[in-house]
């Protein structure tokens, strides 16, 4: 296997690149020391599937179909998200009619679980629908 992003040779570098983009600096300061351990323990079973998923994330586009979503939709975002910026989150809310938007000003892409822990808000939303 080559030494591209999908190989075990660059896995640590790839993961470190990702975490630097999805977490806030405050979270990184607290957790950065654990990332080398995580990259040794949590490797995907198949780097090929990891790359396929990454390509799908980059090329999948259903923007023009968002208006077709009619069910209650919870949209959660971080205003400091460097993966899906605030304007994209607001566009989702504009295009999906029956939505509840939770946009957290001081958080990034990992707002849902690691940083803000929105799990209870997700459960509450589902219970009320």
Image (spheres, rainbow, N blue to C red):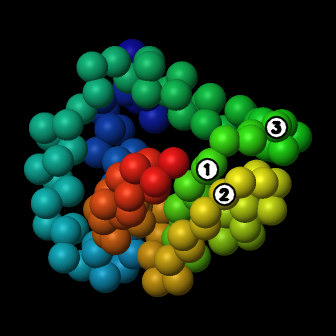
- Please indicate whether residue 105 sits to the left or right of residue 26 in the image: right
Note whether 33 is above or below 67 in the view shown: below
Note whether 80 is above or below 36 in the view shown: below
Query: Residue 56 in the image: x percent, y percent?
Result: 62, 29
Q: Secondary structure at mark 2?
A: strand
Q: Secondary structure at mark 3?
A: helix
| Count of picture labels | 3
Q: Which mark is residue 73?
A: 1
User: How many neighbours does mark 3 have within 10 angstroms: few (below 14), some (14-19), or many (20 or more)?
Assistant: few
Q: Earlier in the sequence, mark 1 or mark 2?
A: 1
- Please indicate whether residue 47 sits to the left or right of residue 42 in the image: right
- Can residue 81 be seen in this snapshot? no
Q: Earlier in the sequence, mark 3 or mark 2?
A: 3
Q: Which residue is mark 3?
A: 68
Contact, CB < 8 Å: mark 3 with mark 2? no
Query: Residue 50 in the image: x percent, y percent?
Result: 43, 27
Gap between marks 3 and 2 measured at Cα: 13 Å
Q: Which residue is mark 2?
A: 99
Query: Residue 23 in the image: x percent, y percent?
Result: 39, 67
């Amino acid at each position: 296997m080559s030494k591209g992003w999908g190989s075990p040779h660059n896995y640590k570098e790839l993961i470190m690149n990702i975490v630097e983009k999805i977490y806030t600096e405050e979270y990184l300061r607290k957790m950065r020391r654990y990332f080398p351990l995580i990259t040794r323990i949590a490797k995907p079973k198949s780097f090929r599937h990891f790359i396929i998923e990454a390509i799908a994330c980059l090329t999948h586009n259903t923007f023009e179909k968002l208006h077709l979503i009619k069910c209650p939709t919870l949209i959660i975002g971080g205003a400091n998200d460097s993966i899906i910026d605030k304007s994209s989150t607001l566009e989702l809310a504009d295009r999906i009619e029956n939505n509840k938007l939770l946009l957290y000003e001081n958080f990034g892409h990992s707002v849902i679980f690691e940083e803000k822990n929105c799990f209870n808000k997700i459960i509450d939303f589902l219970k009320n629908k």
